[in-house]
Image (spheres, helix red, strand yellow):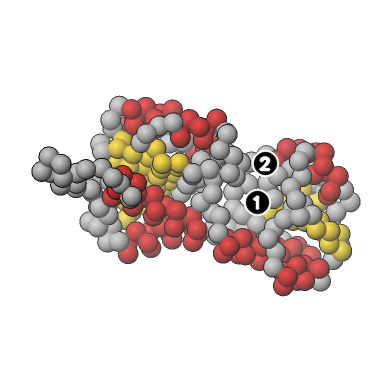
Amino acid sequence: MKIVVTNNQSFTDEQRQRLEKLGDVTFYDYLPQTAEEYLERIKGADIVCSGTAGLQDAHPRIKDVYITVGFVSVAFVDLDVLRKNNVVLSNAPGVNRHAVSEWVMYMVLSLMRSFPKFVNTEEKFRKDGNLPPLTMGLAGNKMTILGQGNIARQVAKLAKAFDMEVSHFKRGDNLTDSVKDADVAVNALSSNPSTSKLLSKDFFAAMKKGGYFVDVTRAEIVDEDAMLESLDGGHLAGVASDCGGILVGDTDDVLYQKLLSHERVLVTPHISYNTPMSMKLGADVMIDNVEAFIKGKPQNVVT
């Protein structure tokens, strides 16, 4: 079996050795810069261990190969095109649940306790005989989590540790009813045709006035203009977004800049997953996927 690793996957020595036992492996330790460079790297491969770079642009031209990624969302490729081209694609569900749920809770704390306002502040709160303003806090307040996947369940576990009242929106529920009493709504939905622009103007209008919205999934799910309109109209009190529709770390992206410019939005450039544990778990599942494919029992298949 010819196996190609298209870019640096942060493999440990043990993981590299494990993969090398499965076939003739070529490792690339830097990102492909173009679709053509990506296609040249995987030419003749039976199995491809891939990142996003290159795959996003090259995938319509890839045929007759097995591809595995070390992360969850594959919304950046057209799965129907891959199926037509006889490409089997596997992902790595759940590997980012700890890192992403940590990000979510940091943002919930930042919004509901106003910590960014107070950390390292030099504001003179007592100059007129006043104390700092009260903040909402988490305990006793209501969180609605959109979704019931790995991330949603981990967020629920952490939120309950803060004594929050937690509920989930799941397929078949009434979306607007699910958030009407929520002090904070957390979007942990998967990106698919049924969730495209699901969180629209009607969704934000249905949220509790003064509530908060935390978004940690793909941009395709959220109507950002409707979200910002709700903020500007005073209905939402604040928003946090990991800007999941952009390339990792791309602070020049138009969407990132748009959210960054709003004073009541906390935004990061698609880094919520980014911890050593996520990388290790992702690499482990990627190699698990290769082993399963070679045994004729592919797992975590999304095509």
- In the foreground, 199 or 241: 241
Image location (x, y in percent) of residue 288: 69, 66
Residue identified by numbered label 2: 77
Hey, which quadrant is residue 193 in on the image?
top right
Q: Quadrant of the N terminus?
A: bottom right
Q: Secondary structure at mark 2?
A: loop
Total residue callouts: 2
Vertical comparison of 31 with 157: above or below: above
Kindly identify the residue that appears in the image at 79 percent across and 54 percent down.
28
Secondary element at image label 1: loop
Q: Is residue 258 left or right of residue 156?
A: right
Q: Residue at x 75, y 51 (%)?
A: 30
Q: Nearer the viewer, mark 2 or mark 1?
A: 2
Q: Which mark is residue 206?
A: none
On the question of residue 81 being in view, the answer is: no
At 47% from the left and 46% from the top, the residue drawn is: 216
Mark 2 → mark 1, Cα distance in angstroms: 11 Å
Which residue is denoted by mark 1 in the rendering?
A: 302
Snapshot quadrant of residue 126: top left
Which tag, 2 or 1, sits closer to the chain's start? 2
Residue 14 visible? The answer is yes
